[in-house]
Image (spheres, rainbow, N blue to C red):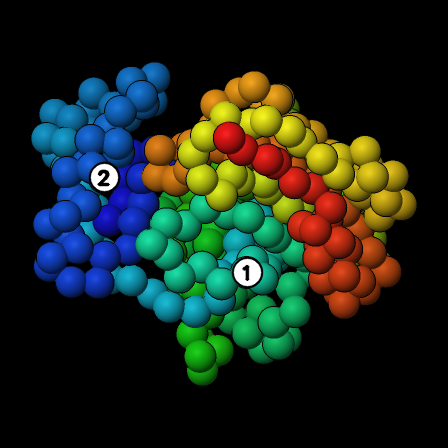
Amino acid sequence: MKPLVDNDTGYLRRVDDIDELTEHFATIQRGAWAGIEHNPLYEWAINEYDYAIILEQYLPGAEISVESIVVDGQAHVIAIHDKPLPATGPYFADVHYTTPSRLPVEVQQRVIELVAAAHRAIGMEMGATHTEFRIQEDGTPKILETAARIGGGPVYQSVLLSTGVDLVTAVLDIASGRKPDLSPRPEPTPTGFYLFFAERAGRISAITGVQEAALNPHVHELSLYRKVGDTVDVPPHVWQSLGHVIFTADSSDGLVRTFNELVKSINLELE
């Protein structure tokens, strides 16, 4: 089950049978339409679909996201992020991204072809796009969604650190009639980010390990959006994380080590 409009609400849930669908439908439906009155599609979608939500087949497999810039109808894939942690539900908050992708070259090439096909299908001629896939056991990429926007969260910073390509500058260049510079550095810098979420609902009583993490030479940006005393919740009732850290390494294996260190270091205590 997922929202028809504004999927960032977090009200996206896997259900495995009719009993689970019956149990969780009303909660997801209410949440999917709550707090999105600012969305320009809100009134139209209500009139057109009468507070409906989407029910679609669940796709297993590893998840990736693809950041592209489209110029004169030509898609230029700038970066592919892996999402190394299993995303099996029942909720699907994004927690950890890494780039460049560790997928086989032939799978990445098929992903690039499908991104271009998706753009042609929706008539995307210019601008930034964010496309997500699930990779099946046999290596077949299955598209989840594509949107005419830069990826959210720290995706912009991650792409910039890894490839040297500034997605925001590229979009502004296109909008201004200039040719964007989409030339990546010869070798991408292994880059990752980690989003913090609470393990349960409660009030933050302490935040530890932040100063130590900030001193890690691989950490480029560390930001907390909440402080001690704040009340926090968990998906599906929230979609935004409690903070993020962006880091680089000399290799993909180095990203794994740094991620594991940060997970152990940064701790939000709740009461």
Q: Is residue 97 above or below residue 212?
A: below
* Tag 1 and tag 2, C-beta contact below 8 Å: no
Q: Is residue 67 above or below residue 135?
A: above
Give the amino acid type for the residue marked by disc 2 in the picture: Ile
Mark yes or no: residue 70 visible. no
- Residue 28 - label: 2
- Residue 85 - label: 1
What secondary structure is marked by label 1? loop
- Residue 197 - label: none
Residue beneath the point at 64% across and 46% down: 194
Q: CA distance from mark 1 to mark 2?
A: 24 Å
Q: In which quarter of the view is residue 189 placed?
A: bottom right
Q: Earlier in the sequence, mark 1 or mark 2?
A: 2
Q: What residue occupies the far front of the structure in this picture?
A: 271
Q: What residue occupies the far bottom of the structure in this picture?
A: 138
What secondary structure is marked by label 2? helix
How far from the left and from the top, in percent, is residue 153?
A: 57, 36
Q: Is residue 78 above or below residue 219?
A: below
